[in-house]
């Protein structure tokens, strides 16, 4: 797995030397996606909260019916924490991303 990731990274870095158009195209695409996603941010946050709430509902219902999976519970709590940080402290994440 690590070897394939390293091979892809080497290929991309080799292309940036010879073809500087690729990083420019990726940057332009990222800028356009960022502009679109910024305008959709409130809706995406509401959707995230609804999905997290649904996950807790299903997790609680699943405990009554059948055995619970520890990994699913841990991932749900991690997801809930990430959504809470994005909702409560978006500037903190922006500062971390800028570093």
Image (tube, rainbow, N blue to C red):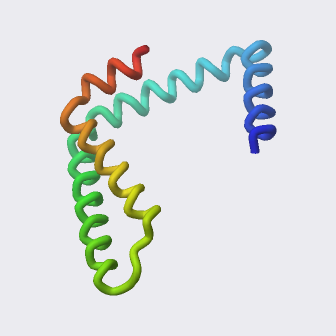
Q: From the top left corner, tell me how far across and down residue 97 is, in percent.
A: 41, 22
Query: Which one is nearer the viewer's eye here, 52 or 46?
Result: 52
Q: Quadrant of residue 16?
A: top right
Number of numbered discs present? Answer: 0
Query: In the rendered view, does 47 fall on the left or right side of 15?
Result: left
Quadrant in which the N terminus appears: top right
Q: Nearer the viewer, residue 17 or 58?
A: 58
Which quadrant of the view contains residue 24?
Answer: top right
Single out the residue that lies furthest toward the bottom.
65
At horizontal 33% and vertical 22% (from top left) the residue drawn is 94
Which quarter of the image is occupied by the C terminus? top left
Pinpoint residue 89: horizontal percent, then vertical percent: 22, 30
Query: Viewed as shown, does residue 2 lie left or right of 28?
Result: right
**Going by the image, does 52 lie left or right of 18?**
left
96 up-or-down from 76: above or below: above
Closer to us: 27 or 96: 96
> Which residue is rendered at x = 28% and y = 52% of the image?
48
Q: Is residue 93 above or below residue 53?
A: above
Q: In the rendered image of this protein, does residue 52 appear above or below residue 33?
A: below
In this rendering, position of residue 96 left or right of residue 5? left
Q: Is residue 75 above or below residue 2?
A: below
Percent x, y of residue 55: 31, 65
- The structure residue drawn at horizontal position 33% and vertical position 54%, both measured from the top left corner, is 77
Please give the name of the residue rendered at 53% of the width and 22% of the height, measured from the top-left corner: 27
Q: Quadrant of residue 69?
A: bottom left
Q: Nearer the viewer, residue 6 or 56?
A: 56
Q: Position of residue 45 (x, y in %)?
A: 25, 45
């Amino acid at each position: 797995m690590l070897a394939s990731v390293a091979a892809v990274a080497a290929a991309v870095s080799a292309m940036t030397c010879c073809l500087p158009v690729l990083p420019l195209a990726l940057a332009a695409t990222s800028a356009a996606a960022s502009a679109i996603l910024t305008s959709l941010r409130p809706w995406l946050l509401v959707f995230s909260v609804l999905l997290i709430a649904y996950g807790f509902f299903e997790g609680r219902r699943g405990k009554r019916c059948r055995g619970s999976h520890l990994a699913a519970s841990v991932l749900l709590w991690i997801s809930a924490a990430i959504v809470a940080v994005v909702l409560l402290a978006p500037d903190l994440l922006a500062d971390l991303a800028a570093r």
